[in-house]
Amino acid sequence: MTQVPSSNGGVEQAAEWLMRRQPAAPAAYCPVDRPAKMRIEDFGAAFDGTEVLRRLNLEICACERLAIIGPASGGKTTFLRSLNRLNDLNPGFSKTGRILLDGKDIYDRAMDVAVLRRRVGMVYAVPIPLPWTIYENIAYGPRMAGVAGRGRLDAIVEGALKSAFLWDEVKDRLADLATNLSGGQQQRMCVARVLALEPEVLLLDEPCSGLDPISTAKIEDALLELKSKYSIVLVTNNTKQAARASDRTAFFLMGELVEVGPTSQVFTNPTHHRTADYITGHFG
Amino acid sequence: MKEKAIHVVLMLLAFSAIAALAVITAFIFKEGVPIIAKVGIKDFIFSSDWYPLEGQFGIFPMIVGSLAVTAGAMVLGVVLGLACAVVLTQFCPQGMVAVIKPSVELLAGIPSVVYGFLGVVILVPLIRDYLGGPGLSVLASSIVLGVMALPTITSISVDAFQAVPRSYREGSIALGATEWQTTHRVILKAARSGIVAAIILGMGRAIGETMAVIMVAGNTLDVPHSLLDPVRTLTSNIALEMGYSAGDHRQALFATGVILFVIIMILNSIALTVSRRRVRKGAAR
C-alpha cells in the first residue's frame, strides 16, 4: 500500500502517499497511538426521516480492534453499514456529516462504491453462503474485482482460508457446497471470503451471535491474528467478548456515542455512568 | 358421516377436472391416430404435400411453420420478458413495480383477436413497406406471439427472481460486486431453473395460439425460406379447415391436433422436470 512513488508518478500521487504516511489523528483521539484509518465526522443517519445516529465523531485506527457495544437499536449496525455504504441499498436512508477513509470522503461522488466495499469488508451476523462451492464463494469477490487465472485464484483462496483458520478443515472439500458446512465453519468461510479481497478495514456485525463457544473462540483467535494487517470493527452484544477481543471499546446508546476508550479503561473505570450501568448489567 | 360425504364430493369434483383432460385426450387420439396409421407416421410428418381432397396428408410445412413462429416469438418474448423481470426485481423502485407489473400482466387479458387485428392493420403493412414480401409472414407472427407470451414469461421469471433470498444480493454487493455483476452472476444463476420453466411455458402459449396467427401469418402451404415468407401453423391448419372438412380430411385435422398435443406435452414435461429438479436441489441444501 505505501510504496514510494515512482519518479514519473506525478504530484498527486506523491501527495497521496504523504497523506497515507502521516499519522492523521491527534493522540487524544487515538490512544492506541496509531494513525487513523477511518475518521467519522459529525455523522448522522436516518431512515425515512427517523434519526438513528446523531452527530457521531469517532476514529478507527490502523491495526486496532475496535469493539462497539450497547443495547439493541442503539445504531450499532447502522453505523457499521454506513462505513461501507451498505445502507445505500435502503431507499429511505439519508445521512449528514462525513466519513473519511484515508482522508477521502467515502460518500463523495468520485468514490467507486464497489472499490470501497472491497477496501472495507463486511461480515454479517448470520453467515450468507452463496449457493455455490466453498471455492467459488471465496473466489467470487476477487473475480468480480478482475482477478483471473486459476493459479492466482487458487493462491488467494488458500491464503484466505488459512487466515480464517478454516483451511485444515476444508482443504479436501473445496468443491463441496458451502451450504453444507456447519454454522461456525460457514461464518469463518464468510470471514475468509472478505479476506480474499485483501480489505483494509474489516467490519464484523455480531459475528458470533449464532455460534457455540468453540467456534467463537476460533473466530476471536482469527481476529487477534488479523489485527496486524487490518483495522477491525467488531459490533457485539456480548460485553465479555468485547473485553476479550478488542483494543478499544465504544459504547453506543440511542444513536449516540456515549464514550470510547481503551477497552481496559472502559471496562474497569468508565467515565460515564450509563456505560458503567450497561457493563455491569443494570440495563440493556 | 358428514365429513365423509364432503370428502367424497370434493374428490369427485377434483377428479372431474382430470376426467375432462382424459376425455379430450382419448377423443383426439381416437379420431386422429387411425389416419396417421393409414398415411404412415413418416409420410404424415415429413411429407410436404397437403392435398386433403386427393387424400394426401403431409403436415411438414406446418410443423416447420409452428416451430419457426414459436422460435421467433421466443427470441422476442424471452429478451423483453427477462429484461422486464430483471428491472422489476433488481433495479426499479417499489412504486414503479406497482405500476409496471400489473400492466404487463394486463397484456394477458387482451383477446387474441385484438392482437391479430392490430398485427394486420399496423404491423403487416409496416413489414410489407419497409422489409418487402407480402407482409403476412413468420416475422409478423413472431412479433405478435412474442408480445402475447410476454406476461407469462415476465410474471413467472419475476416469481423466480423473488424466490432468490434477498441476502444473496446483499452478500454479493458487500463483496464489492456491482449491481449488474450481482444480477448476472448471483441472481440469474440462482433463478435459472425458474427462468427455464418460464420460457417453456411461454413457448407453450406461443405454439398453441391460433386466432392471432391466422390473421398475420398468411397461411400458405409452403415451407418458409425466410422470415418474410408467409406460413401456416398446426393450429391455424385445424381452425381454417375444420369448417368444411369431412371423412379422412377431418380425421387428418384431428391427427394434426395429435402432433400438436405431443409437442406441447414434451414442452410441459421438460418444464416440470426442470422445476422439480429445483425443488429437489432445494431440499438437499
Image (tube, rainbow, N blue to C red):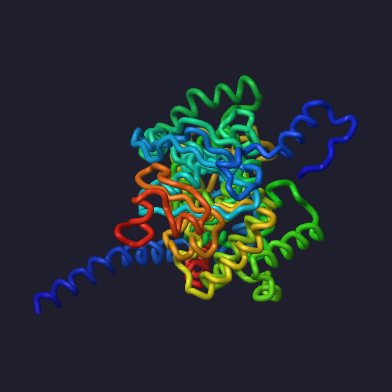
Residue B7 is drawn in which quadrant?
bottom left
Q: Residue furthest top?
A: B129
Front-lying residue, B282 or B93: B93
* Residue at image point 36% right, 54% down: A71
Q: Position of residue B263 (x, y in %)?
A: 53, 58
Q: Quadrant of the N terminus of chain A?
A: top right
Q: Position of residue B37 (x, y in %)?
A: 55, 66
* Residue at image point 80% right, 57% down: A152
Q: Residue furthest bottom?
A: B1
Q: Position of residue B86 (x, y in %)?
A: 52, 42
* Relative height, residue B215 to residue A157 (above, below): above
* Relative height, residue A55 to residue B46 (above, below): above
Q: Residue furthest right?
A: A7
From this viewpoint, is residue B94 visible?
Answer: yes
- In the drawing, does residue A140 fall left or right of residue B243? right
Residue B93 is drawn in which quadrant?
top left
- In the drawing, does residue B115 fall left or right of residue B46? left
